[in-house]
Amino acid sequence: MSSLVATAFGKASADNRAALVGYLPAGFPTVEGAIEAARAMAAAGADILEIGLPYSDPLIDGPVIAEAVHRALTAGTRVADVLRTVEAVAAAGVPALVMTYWNPVDRYGVRAFARDLAQAGGAGLITPDLSPEEAGPWLDASDEHRLDRVFLAAPSSTDQRLATITKACRGFVYAASLMGITGTREAVSGQAEGLVQRIRPHTDLPVAVGLGVSNGAQAAQVAAFADGVIVGSAFVRRLLDAADAAGAAGTAAAGTDAAAGTDAVAELAAELSAALRRARP
């Protein structure tokens, strides 16, 4: 089954580069602000976008993403806002995957969520806390609505475990470069390349590396061995910085945070995209 995500990876491969996968949570700094930021990232070179579904009990979110998600929840962001964000990104011509913990999907209803995500033009789900063994209803619903399902592989995963994970995946395989929470780091984990090499024998799907990539040099490093580079906290940090700067300046600057944040994430997306285009001879 072909998919929008697979097509995006195919286009990047044809250009002899890794795909850029960017993440933003829906609802931050506002629902409309997140939509504008996502559109700007797409226009600046992001090939695929992950739209985070804000959740009150995150497991792998580091402090940057956790703070943005908290603000989105405090402002009243709901699943309907996530779907509206997905719809806007899809309309911009970029595949939109929802990154979500499983409880909100389970409470919404798995088949209903798959139906509504497909109707919004969404490409599928990334589910960091859902194991393939417990994913039966989602596997069925994703088949029914032709949605991708992306599971995470970790450096601690055994070869047998990698076979199980990759068999359940569609779209791409998410290789978590390290054990731990999300966040920018000084260097990409040395475990990332080995994990990608261990995944390859089990699947023909693209393999994208996430957790810890924050700048062009790190993106180029990952592009040497992976099909995609996933960047989240670095984008969210720019939105947070813009919002905090506006807040510190007082109410006169309150309306400038969204525009400044949008410009900042577009600048980072352009930097990362350019680095990926230069990374391979």
Image (spheres, rainbow, N blue to C red):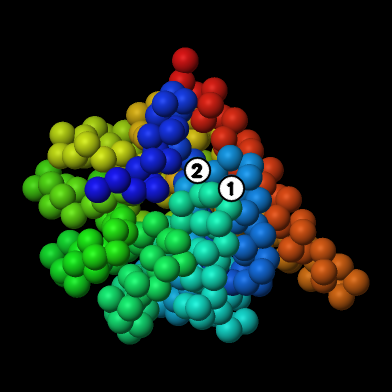
Q: Is residue 26 left or right of residue 164?
A: right
- Using the image, tell me which numbered label, if any, was put on residue 117: none
Residue neighbourhood size for the residue with mark 2, other residues' Cα within 10 Å, grouped as few (<14), some (14–19), many (≥20): many
The vertical placement of 186 against 247, above or below, is above
| Label annotation for residue 47 | 2
Q: Give how far across and how far down residue 276 sits, in percent.
A: 51, 30
Amino acid at circle 2: Asp
* 257 to 42, vertically: above or below: below
Q: Give above or below for 137 relative to 146.
A: below
Residue appearing at x 22%, y 36% in the figure = 204
Q: Residue at x 67, y 47 (%)?
A: 266
> The disc labelled 1 sits on which kind of residue?
Ala
Residue 233 in the image, given as x and y percentages of width and height: 53, 55
Please report the residue visible at 40 percent of the width from the left and 29 percent of the height from the top.
Answer: 13
Can residue 61 be seen here? The reply is: no
Q: Residue at x 55, y 57 (%)?
A: 91
Residue extending farthest top: 281
Gap in Å between the C-alphas at discs 1 and 2? Answer: 7 Å
Quick one: SS at disc 1? helix
207 or 69: nearer the viewer: 207
Q: Which residue is mark 1?
A: 42
Sequence order check, earlier mark of 1 and 2: 1
Splitting the image into 4 quarters, where does residue 223 fall?
top left
